[in-house]
Structure formats: structure tokens, C-alpha cells
Image: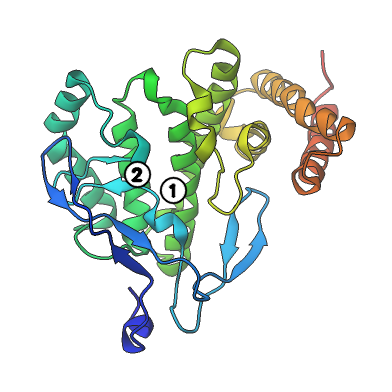
Amino acid sequence: MTATALAQGKKISFRNKEDTVCPVCSEVHQRESMFQGGGRLIAGRLTQELRRLYEKNKKFGRVNPNDYILSVCPRCLYTAFPKDWSILDAEENGKLRESVDNRRKNMELILGPLDFYQDRNLVLGSASYLLAIECYQVRKGTVAPTPKKAVCAIRGAWYFDDLHTEFPEIGFDKIRDLLYQKSAGWYTDTMEIMQSGSEPVDAASYLLGPDTDKNWGFDGVIYLSAYLTMKFKDELASDPQSKLNLLVRAKRTLSRLYGSGKASKSKPSVIIDMAKELYDSYNKIIDEMGGEK
């Protein structure tokens, strides 16, 4: 909680009355949730990455609903979306139990000492998404870990962009860009999974977001896969021909969203307009590289 909010007796969050028990280390704690209403959230613009920005609140200071989305055990740092919290088989549980020390060490190398018994803030919010990625790496396909890692990676990139703005000398921008690239890969993988059915992507549709302000669902997956591919084309492909092939594939995927938007008035105009702008950018750069073969 910010000093401003404390001074005015204003609270952003509360602790749930029901106990939460960690399935990995059996720690009993109370999950933190955000109060709704009361003028806490002041919505700003929507970015090209489908991120909803929030203005700083004079009464409450910084408020971000993404701080409270993930459940984190304050003792062993096991992290998951609430629906996946207790769905652990013996193998997953064992791996998560064995990696407790590594989880804490990895986080402290990046963000310093962490205390999830305290109220969520910018640093703990950032850590929660890194922890979620690490924990979902050992989760099985039954919980659809790939789209969840994609969402966590792009939200984590937003957090580290904010951290870089606050502390520009530390190098958080490098972690931000790495998370963006990871997200690009996982969003592309999610596109393939949607076709193959190797993970129950429908089970993750409620959080595809990618932000909590509006869930763009599978349209968001298609758009972000193409957007992030364009943004990190140089990092994702090592030579001109590979880059051209990458861009052509991404453009064809994007055309599914842009084309369906032109054919259906039910599609939100915001994402269709952004898809059209991105589609035009793809056409331009592909033509400059010699065109589709």
C-alpha cells in the first residue's frame, strides 16, 4: 500500500477471511484481494499491446488490478491462477517442492528479497508473474500451461517496463524485452495448440485477456501473436529468408482476424482497426523484403 493511501486511511486491498492452504508446503495464509469500486481505478488509454493503462490516483496512489490476479504462497513461492491452485498431481507437486530454494534465489537475483506476507506492490506484482511462468513450466498440458505462460509473460513485460521507468539504471528493460520475446513464442505456440488440441486452450479462455480490463479472447491471441512477431522479428529470426518466412506466416494468421472483422459487424472495432493497421505494416515490410514467394 502506498504512503498516501496509508496516511488517508484508504485501503486498496483486503485479506480474505477464508484460509488458503498451499498444496506444496501446506502454509496457511489469507489471500489478498482488491477492493472494488470507491473510485480506486481511473482507466486511461488502451495500448497497441491491448494493455489498459491506469492513471495514478490522488487518494490511493498507484493501483493495478493485475497485482492481485495470481495466488502466491508466501512461504515456498508456489504460484498459479486460482483455478489451478489445488490441481496438482504427485509429479508436479514433487518438482515444485524440490525447486523452492531455486525459485527464491532466482527471484532475489532479479528483484531482491521478497515478502509476500506484505501487501502487493509494483515489485511483488512483477515477481508474481515471473514466479507463475517458472511454476507453469512444470505443469502438465491438462491445465493449458502454454497460453497461461504467454499471458504471464506479456503482463510481466508490462511490469518490468514500469520498473524500468521507476529505476532506469538497473537494467529492467533487458528482462522486459526477454519477456516480450518469450510471450511472442508462447502466443505462436498457442496458435498451433488451438489447431492441434494438444492442450485444452478453451479452459484458459477466461484469462487470455491479455489484460483484466477486457478479455479479447482468441482474437487477442491472434492479434498479439502477430504484433509481437513484428516487434521482435530481428530477435526471432537470424537471417533475412527466415525473417521473411516468419513474417509471411504471421501475416496469414493475422488475416484471419482482419478478414473476419470485415465480414462481421459483431467484432469490436478497436481490435479490428489495430489489426488492419498491423496488417498494412506487414504488407509494406514484406514487399520491401521481396514479397511473398
The residue where tag 2 is placed is 130
Label drawn at residue 45: none
Q: Position of residue 87 (x, y in %)?
A: 28, 28
Residue closer to the observer: 265 or 225: 265
Figure check: 276 above or below 214 = above
Q: Which residue is mark 1?
A: 156
Can you give x and y, in whole percent of width and height, for residue 76 in the image?
15, 43
**Residue type of the residue flagged with mark 2:** Leu
Report the number of numbered marks.
Answer: 2
Q: Identify residue type, mark 1.
A: Gly
Q: Secondary structure at mark 2?
A: helix
Local crowd size for mark 1, using a 10 Å CA cut-off: few (<14), some (14–19), many (≥20): many
- The answer to whether residue 91 is left or right of residue 188 is left
Q: Position of residue 119 (x, y in %)?
A: 27, 65
CB atoms of marks 2 and 1 within 8 Å:
yes
Q: Is residue 177 left or right of residue 273?
A: left
The residue most toward the front is: 18
Label located before the other in sequence (2 or 1): 2
- Asked which quadrant contains residue 276, the reply is top right
Judged from the image, the secondary structure of the residue bearing numbered disc 1 is helix
* 230, above or below 194, in the image: below
* x and y, in percent, of residue 154 in the image: 50, 44
| Viewport quadrant of the C terminus | top right
The answer to whether 106 appears left or right of 224 in the picture is: left
> For the point 66% across and 24% down, which residue is it?
243
- 27 or 171: which is nearer to us? 27
| Residue, far bottom | 8
Q: Residue at x 48, y 27 (%)?
A: 203
Residue 78 lies in quadrant: top left
Q: Using the rendered image of the protein, determine whether residue 228 is visible from the camera's viewpoint.
A: no
Mark 2 residue crowding within 10 angstroms, few (<14) / some (14–19) / many (20+)? many
